[in-house]
Image (cartoon, grey):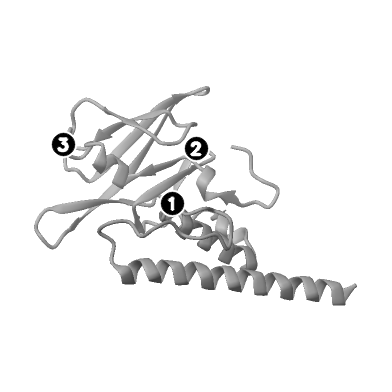
Amino acid sequence: MPRPSSGRFRVEGIPRICIKEMRERGVFGKYPWAGAPVRYPNSCESLESLDCEFTDNKSSVVFSTYIAKGRWARAVQLKWVPVHFGGKRPYFLCPNCYKRGVKLYLIDWELYCRKCTPTYYDCQREDRTWRRHSRAQKIRAKWNADRKPGSLFPQKPKHVHNITYQRAINKVANLEAEHVMLWHQDLRALLEHE
C-alpha cells in the first residue's frame, strides 16, 4: 500500500481484521480449534478472504492468504476475557505493543492496532466549522430528514418518544446555527486579514 504524502493513512481505507465481524460470522462459534482453516470473508476489497487457523489451546490464530508474492501468514495472540453472564470474549493482542484490541489494521503486510498505526479518521481532518455540519448531517440521515440545512424534519415516527424527537430537532438546529456562526467568523477573519 503506497504511503500518502503526509505519512498518515485514512482509517476508513485500510484493510482490517475485526474480531466482532468474526464473531458475527460464526468463526468463533464453530470452534475449529486445530482443525481445517476457516474462511473469513473480509469487508475490505484488498483482502477478499483470509484463512483462519486456531491453535490447540485457543491462545492464538494464524491468518493467511495468497498475494502476488506468494503465501502471506501472520500469527496473532488472542486474549480471552470473562464477561458478566458467563463465557469469554476474545480480543486480539497487537503484535507490536501487546495491548488488547478489537481491530487490527494491515499496513505494508504487517498487522497493527489503531494506536500503533499512523492513521486518522476523516472527521479529524475537518475544521471546527465543518465538524458541526457533519454531525448535523449524520443526525438528519438517522431521522431520514432532508439533508439541506434549515429544512424541516419529517413527521415524528411512531413509537418514538416526543422528547427524543424534539431533542434531535434541537440538536440539529443548534449545530447548524453554530456552523453558520463559525463560518461567518472565519469569513470575517479572512476578510480582515486581507
Q: Residue furthest right?
A: 194
Q: Is residue 147 left or right of residue 2?
A: left
Describe the element under mark 1 as helix, strand or loop: loop
Q: Quadrant of the N terminus?
A: top right
Q: Tag 2 or tag 1, which sits nearer the N-term?
A: 2
Could you tell me which residue is drawn at 68 percent across and 52 percent down? 6
Q: Tag 3 or tag 1, which sits nearer the N-term?
A: 3
What x and y, as percent, mark residue 60? Answer: 26, 43
- Relative depth, front residue between 25 and 82: 25
Q: Quadrant of the C terminus?
A: bottom right
Q: Is residue 164 left or right of residue 57?
A: right
Label 2 Cα neighbours within 10 Å, binned few <14 / some 14-19 / many ≥20: few
Describe the element under mark 2 as helix, strand or loop: loop
Q: Which residue is mark 3?
A: 31
Viewer-side label of 1, 2? 1
What x and y, as percent, mark residue 18? Answer: 35, 45
Distance from Cα at disc 1 to Cα at disc 2 = 40 Å
Q: Amino acid at mark 1?
A: Asn
Q: Is residue 82 left or right of residue 153?
A: left
What x and y, as percent, mark residue 102? Answer: 34, 52
Q: Is residue 8 left or right of residue 101?
A: right
Q: Dividing the picture into quarters, in which one does residue 24 lie?
A: top left
Q: Which residue is mark 1?
A: 144
- Relative depth, front residue between 185 and 38: 185
Could you tell me which residue is drawn at 64 percent across and 43 percent down? 3
What x and y, as percent, mark residue 30? Answer: 16, 34
Q: Which residue is mark 2?
A: 109
Q: Tag 2 or tag 3, which sits nearer the N-term?
A: 3
Q: Amino acid at mark 3?
A: Tyr
